[in-house]
Image: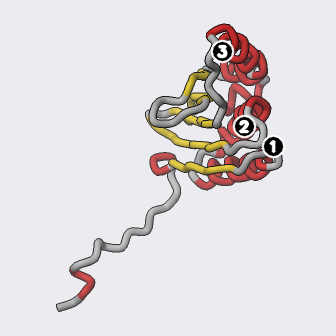
Amino acid sequence: MSNSALCPPETSAVPTPANFNYSLGLPGGPYCISTARNLVRTVLCEHDLGDLAEVGVLATSELLGNAYAFTPGHEAHLSMRWRFGVLRLTVFDEHPAHEAAGIFAVCRERRREALSLLDAVTDACGGICGLAEADAPLYGSRVWVVLPREAGALYARL
């Protein structure tokens, strides 16, 4: 009996928008932003989403810059997905919880202000930019953008 019958058949998946789903842990420090930017550009192009590369790189820079500015010296996690016709870039950081409600509100407002450029670009490109606490069992913050396919062309016109 051949062992090949026990193994799943070999498939040769090629990069397409449908299988664009990457996650990357990044060590603490802004030096990681250039690595992430290069990776985002490369994988978007490989998955036939190159028209979103420029706006995706900007979003990656801003999301990670925000994470490292408000959680210096801590790791961040970048998630990249194409689902339901939109590009989703999400950064999770290890921002500590604030015990006092007033401090939490001030910190959240400062983080939103630091995302103002990304907010404006994302809005002009028909997308959404968000900031929230990470859902359990994770802790920290989650910042993200959701960009439709036409965001690349809209960004090129800005």
Q: Secondary structure at mark 1?
A: loop
Place residue 109 in its image quadrant. Answer: top right
- Mark 1 vs 2: CB contact within 8 A: yes
Q: Nearer the viewer, mark 2 or mark 3?
A: 3
Q: Amino acid at mark 3?
A: Phe
Quadrant the N terminus occupies: bottom left
46 left or right, relative to 18: right
| Residue that mark 2 sits on | 64
Determine the residue located farthest toward the front in the rendered image.
Answer: 99
| Residue that mark 1 sits on | 30
Q: Earlier in the sequence, mark 1 or mark 2?
A: 1
| Residue that mark 3 sits on | 104
Q: Amino acid at mark 2?
A: Leu
Local crowd at mark 1 within 10 Å, few (<14), some, or many (≥20)?
Answer: some
- Mark 2 vs 3: CB contact within 8 A: no
Q: Residue at x 70, y 48 (%)?
A: 41
Determine the residue located farthest toward the left in the rendered image.
Answer: 1
